[in-house]
Amino acid sequence: MRIAVPNKGRLHEPTLSLLERAGLHVENGSDRKLYADTVDPDVQVLFARAADIPAYVADGAAAVGVTGRDQVHEHEHGTDLEELLDLELGKCRLVLASPEDGPIRETADLADGTVATEFPNITRTFFEGTDVSPDIVEVSGATELTPHVDMADAIVDITSTGTTLRMNRLAIVDEVLQSSVRLYAHPDRVDDEKVRQVETALASVLAAEGKRYLMMNVPSDSLADVEDVIPGMGGPTVMDVDSRASETPGEDGDGAEEDAVAVHVVVEEREVFETITRLKEAGARDILVTEIERLVE
């Protein structure tokens, strides 16, 4: 099975990192290679331009592909692909924008206008949902300059923070499409066992982000108080502790066994600081916090 991934650009390294964390280490891969093996002998990576990945998946050259939602919607067969997972990378928007001091204030103002874009199919689909039919001019770069050289009245372009638009004195008129990097599959391969394994592996990495694993020892008579403090997923796991490891010194110096349990729980990273303080107050001790690489829900 082949996975098509971006061969370069800002999505290349984050995608390979995600595969690595999912357990699919890419072997002998480089920007100049078309294919690379992974540690799974049944999974191979195909390196391609992000804009070409929808075509590779649609044509069956790859069972699944990692690329932006904008690239899929721009491809003529993109809507036939099955979206399996939002990988939450490369978040951005396609927006309709026009000069700040110009006459375009809303979409309806483009009734007789011209729109320049690198995404003609997405732009055409957007305007089909309105009562406006502007001329659409496809450009291959520097889209934000076209209104200032009288090539267009407005543009449809990608923005993440809006900084480039502001630098070029452009104001957002409307939102066209929200995009992020996602995992797509050929419709005929959605139920393949290996495709499902890849989807589960990637989903487990995403599920683990922003979470921490807490382990602690708790006296049995404090367990109820500790459980009231824990904000974890689905409640804690409680296990008996080896009595030899829970001995506490008695008044006469002899070891006295203490009835205690081990408590394990997954919590949100942002809650760890306050949670640990409250756990200690509730009687927990020997609290250990670790990162989570993958979480299969």
Image: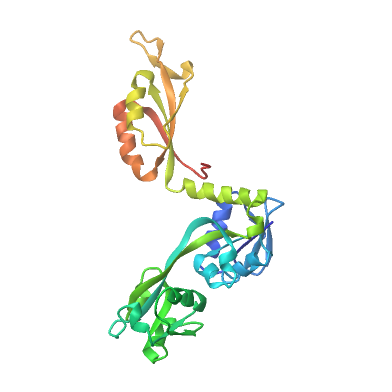
Location of residue 264 in the rendering, given as x and y in whole percent from the top left corner:
44, 31
Q: Quadrant of residue 250?
A: top left
Q: In which quarter of the image is residue 227?
A: top left
Q: Quadrant of the N terminus?
A: bottom right
Is 280 situated above or below 209?
above
Query: Residue at coordinates 33% horizontally, 40% vertically from top-left?
Result: 273
Query: Residue at coordinates 40% horizontally, 11% vertically from top-left?
Result: 256
Location of residue 86 in the rendering, given as x and y in whole percent from the top left corner:
50, 57
Location of residue 280 in the rendering, given as x and y in whole percent from the top left corner:
32, 30
Query: Residue at coordinates 37% horizontally, 84% vertically from top-left?
Result: 111
Residue at the farthest right position: 41
Query: Residue at coordinates 39% horizontally, 91% vertically from top-left?
Result: 149
Answer left or right for 190 relative to 263.
right
Q: In which quarter of the image is residue 248?
A: top left
Is 153 situated above or below 282?
below
Location of residue 291 in the rendering, given as x and y in whole percent from the top left corner:
46, 43
Answer left or right for 171 relative to 242.
left
